[in-house]
Amino acid sequence: MEESAEPSAALCQLPELDSVYEQYGGREAEAQELSQWLQKPGSRVAAVVADGGMGKTCLAVDVAWRLWRCRAASAGALYVDCRAAFSREALVMRLRAAAGLSGGDQGGMEALAAALGKMCSSDKLGGCLLVVLDNAEDPAAADGGAALAEILAQLVMASARLQLLVTSRVEVAVQHMPPPHTHRLQPLSAAVAGPLVQQIAKGVLTGEEARAVATACGCVPLVLRLVSEALVAGRLALEDVQEAVAGRGGGAAEGEAAAAVAGSGEAAAGEQREVTVMFVDMVIRSLPAAMKKVAMQVAAFSGVLTAGSAAVVMGVGPSSEQEVRTQLAGLHRLSVVLQHGDDAFVMHTHVRDVARRLLAEEAPPPLRTAVRERFARYAVGLLARWQKLHEANALKLMATEVAAQWPDVEQLLADVAGDAAAAGARPLLPGAGLLPLSAQFLQETSLLAILGSSDFLYAVGNAWMSPQYLTLTLRLVEATEAPAAESESESESESTGRERRLAFAAALLVRCEALMYTGEYVESEGLAARAVAQYEQLRGRDSVECAAALHLHASCLAGQGRGAEAVPLYREALAVRGAALGPHHKATTATITHLAMQLSMEGQHGEAEAMYRQVLDASQRTFGPSHNLTAQALSNLAGCLHELGKLTEAEALYRRALDVYRDTVGPQHRQVAFTLVGLAAVAREAGADLEAVEGLYREALEVCRTALGPRHPHSQMTLRSLQELLRERGKGQEAEELTI
């Protein structure tokens, strides 16, 4: 494989290879083998699979650079870090950002496939577009790998000249396609590992000692590097390594220990992980106190870190960034952090987990508290910046930043959720919720205002659908709730108490809306009623804040089928919002829409239709024809026209809404499910082919599973509608067996 004399003009996003890997990676033969396979005609998908510490990322990046330099990937080389992308939406978001698409661009996965296809067709050299998906075990963990397999298939179908190189700790599949070519990384051979250790520890270890160290470390690349660098620095001695192995193995011979680690099967893999963690722990503990403190603090990051972000979490000002950069460079020389581009680093998962454990178990309590609070403020600062970019319509820049730094927001949610966190991101400090989630913290970070912006949360990936987010909303209420009566007068001034009660009311509404999206209308009703009472007392019944609470209270009642009680509250909220914000404001049109829904349910379709047309006109004027709020207006008007028997216009509006939703919020959004059900009902009544109608219901039910969950009333309604249709088509048994 020869390197091209001329560089390609195509896009290359590959991170620079870690300098340590370039010096002594030990995977030259495997890199050549994988590169050659990817250059064969028809080679489309390759996966590098291994446990942590084996060097999957370095090998994949090495191979990608080889293909780029010899122009086998002349159409471009994209790199997508899947770390902490624990949902389909998060992975699609990162893929779109890598392809240069913003959150406001149209088309979802369809636009992504078109953009990738265009990159392939614009290349005149006949090479491929290579997409590297690194750390794919995180999206694979979301639903058993089904969403990942679907996305991989869609990428492959984008162009015959597109290739995928995936790294993962678990097996990966491509939907409806043969298994990918899988390269399973094993520990290095003793013949390679011994000389590598000797090369790193030149002048410190003899050849025989280097071989002994390699054997003791199980020939795992990460461990070889960490231990060898520690030996060179004099922080570990050969006797320390030998004693660790002897103590763990009960005095077993080194050769026997190595054989156990190098064996096959799950038991051997578990043995290998234990050895890796043991030595990582030993190395981190051996660091000088100041360097160990830095390592524990930067372990707060789940994704990429820089000197600037590390300085925030370490509590030093911008003037000290150069010193932080020097400290990170020192940790890199010791392989405690790894390069990830210019002035950017990542921590290997094993290293990060050990450093976090030491922070939790051994760091002084003030340091633990400070790290958690600083990191929380940093993560909320990311959300605040993205919200400003969203409001300024700088969607492409926002999408790029979200794709790169979303893991740290996921980490914030996990920190708040504590042990209640679902599979995925793990808390920074196990067993505890976020300490600084206080009224002062909320006021200083504006977290409540950020989380109250639903359209912004949609733009950054449906954050509220995670269990961690629901836990966050509960903590918000707890953090702002009134203190004990006997201490209130002593602990709060009148102005401070007022601000705290306003924060409490805002937290109630954030929690209320989150519960509404999961269908918990009874609990959310109580929260909304409390918020109304708070705002009425503090701001007045005719305030915009109280109107927002009245609107949500009405929605909670409507969700329980209590429309007669909801309508007066909607009318009251509308009067306040219309007067204060104007008839075209999105808050005003939201209330008009919900009021129209209730009027339509009560048979007042004429008045409802006029309201829906008013909202559609306002949305098109304010946001344009391709905005998700315009799609909502289209869908709502279509539903009303369905009730009036105007089926042709209703179907056309539903289809327009469906196209816009798929373009703006993606195919797995809850609004897509609502629109599909409406379209199916209209098509069925209009006499459409029942097989096509069944397909619409099935698609809607699939979206409900992802976006709403089985308990949501709309999910249950969709299930019943599909079951009814199946029975009508003579599929009674299938209808009975169907579940969500």
Image: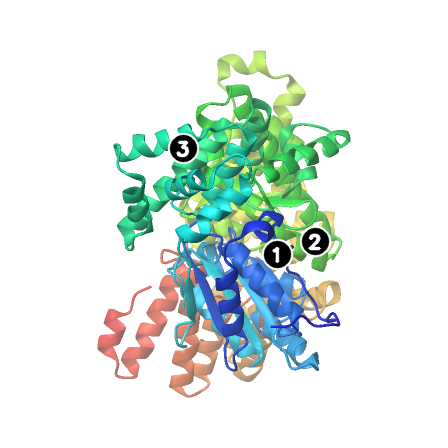
Q: Residue at x 62, y 58 (%)?
A: 592
The quadrant of the rendering that contains the C terminus is bottom left
Horizontal side, residue 716 vs residue 433: left or right: left
Q: Amino acid at mark 1?
A: Ala
Residue drawn where x is 52% and y is 79% of the image: 40
Marks 2 and 3, the one that precedes in the sequence = 3
- Secondary structure at badge 3 equals helix
Q: Which residue is mark 3?
A: 241
Question: What is the crowding at mark 2: few (fewer than 14 residues within 10 Å), some, or many (at least 20)?
Answer: many
| Above or below 445: residue 110 | below
Quarter of the image for residue 540 reads top right
> Which residue occupies the extreme left position in the image?
733
Q: Identify the element where label 2 is drawn.
A: helix
Front residue of this view, candidates 437 and 229: 229
Earlier sequence position, callout 2 versus callout 1: 2
Q: Are marks 2 and 1 in contact (CB under 8 Å)?
A: yes
Q: Label 2 belongs to which residue?
A: 390
Residue 278 relative to residue 581: left or right: left
- Residue drawn at 73 percent across, 33 percent down: 321
Query: Looking at numbered disc 3 in the image, what kind of residue is underneath it?
Result: Val
Q: CA distance from mark 2 to mark 1?
A: 8 Å
Q: Amino acid at mark 2?
A: His
Q: CA distance from mark 1 to mark 3?
A: 50 Å
For the point 36% across and 58% down, the residue is: 710
Q: Of label 1 and label 3, which has the lower sequence position?
A: 3
Q: Position of residue 263 (x, y in %)?
A: 29, 52
Q: Is residue 60 above or below residue 456?
A: below
Q: Quadrant of the N terminus?
A: bottom right
Q: Residue 446 location in percent, x, y?
A: 65, 37
From this viewpoint, which residue is outermost toward the right? 319
Which residue was labeled with disc 1? 459
Nearer the observer, 623 or 24 = 24
